[in-house]
Image (cartoon, rainbow, N blue to C red):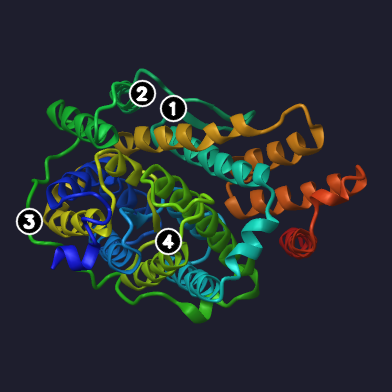
Amino acid sequence: MLEKLFQLKAHNTTVRTEVIAGITTFLAMAYILFVNPTILGATGMDKGSVFVATCLAAAIGSALMGFIANYPVALAPGMGLNAFFTYTVVLHMGYSWQIALGAVFLSAVLFFALSLFKIRELIINSIPLPMRSAIAAGIGLFLALIALEGAGIVVDNPATLVGIGDLTKPGPLLALLGFILIVVLEARRLTGAVLIGILCITFISMGIGLTPFGGIFSAPPSLSPTFLQLDIKGALNVGLISVIFAFLFVDVFDNTGTLIGVTRRAGLVDAQGNSPKMGKALVADSMAALFGSLLGTSTTTSYVESAAGVSAGGRTGLTALVVAVLFLLSLFFAPLAGSVPVYATAPALLFVAVLMTSGLAEIDWRDVTTAAPVTITALAMPFTYSIANGIALGFISWTVIKLLSGRKSEVNITLVILSILFVIKLGWLSA
């Protein structure tokens, strides 16, 4: 049955190899089980329910990818998108988490339509490569600020906006220790470095009496506090249009980049370097995001940590199916997830930020007409506390600078239209 479903022989793999690859991928991305409830819980959402939604969304998404596209790519609620959901849409803009879930649902519907009708290529191709790197880096810097603030390393300062916290307190010290531990373990190529870092800091915190021990195993919490609680009507508010498109843009770029990278590493591309089942993979991705919003979590997306499983030999959707099963089993670890303090998840956010900002190395910094919009995009996200504002200011500055510098060939009609729409949107915000 597995051979018929996943064509193991054709992909030169075995059930044992796929299972090992699935376990490897799961260990590399299981940190989301602890991080996602912490981030979304800041909106007032029930953390136990978010934990269950995270497990189910990851399981459903990974299974869809395995069965529809037969790719060894796992899915879960995306880092960066969950921070945008919480810190920008809910806490900064003032919308309820129910409306934010409605925006996630609408962006997933648009993503599904783009994937189904193959409009995705038009959008992707219209965004210059440097701007894609800038968006990823900006999200990384945004995560870094959230991590440092959550750990108490960076604090509010009325004179300078931000300042350094009290580094003699246990929280900031444990966060710094966790970050160093994750980096060292990753440098030594230990699978699950981020997860190990989170758990080590959590257990140390419990050991010195900072965090109460809530247990390890239990029956899964109720999903009802977040299940089908999305407010689609509220999300249709004109002021949320840019939020919906921000969810959409980041999801499209994130998914496309991850799928291209992982499938190339797995040797699942054709002679021209294209992924033949990319369309099916994107349909699976968009369907996963739809289910995630219904369950009660931020956008579900493909995980670059899937490359760990590919390195272990994963070549088919059976790898993703193994990940799905492991996320279902994780439903019984809710007490442990609830015991993880903020300063234990902050190092994971900071480490993800390191990975996301590395794309800036590909920018041609000698070209000031490229360097300026890239810098504006990357810095605007953390400093305005909004991924949407960063994208908007980045697109506008790219279009204006390139046109006025006589570089019309680097601007297309799609960019011009998007820039005009963002100018209008920013005008509404200032008003």
Q: Secondary structure at mark 3?
A: loop
Of the 4 image quadrants, the one containing the N terminus is bottom left
Q: Disc 2 versus disc 3: distance between alpha carbons?
A: 31 Å
Residue occupied by mark 1: 153
Q: Is residue 114 left or right of residue 422?
A: left
| 429, 82: nearer the viewer | 82
- Please name the residue that numbered disc 4 is placed on: 299
- The image quarter in which residue 114 lies: bottom right
User: Amino acid type of disc 4?
Assistant: Thr
Amino acid of disc 1: Ile
Compared with residue 112, is residue 2 higher up or lower down, i.e. above or below?
above
Instruction: Identify the secondary structure beneath mark 2.
Output: helix
- Residue 255: percent from the left, percent from the top? 47, 55
* Mark toward the start of the polypeptide (2 vs 3): 2
User: Looking at numbered disc 2 in the image, what kind of residue is underneath it?
Assistant: Leu
Which numbered circle lies on residue 176? 2
Q: Earlier in the sequence, mark 1 or mark 3?
A: 1
Between residue 11 and residue 73, name the one nearer to us.
Answer: 11
SS at mark 4 in the image: loop
Residue in the image at 14% along x and 50% along y? 335
- Graded by Cα atoms within 10 Å as few (under 14), some (14 to 19) or many (20 or more), the crowding at tag 1 reads many
Please tell me whether mark 2 or mark 4 is closer to you in this view: 4
Q: Earlier in the sequence, mark 3 or mark 4?
A: 3
- Whether residue 338 is visible here, answered yes or no, is no
First of labels 4, 1 by sequence position: 1
Q: Are marks 4 and 1 in contact (CB under 8 Å)?
A: no
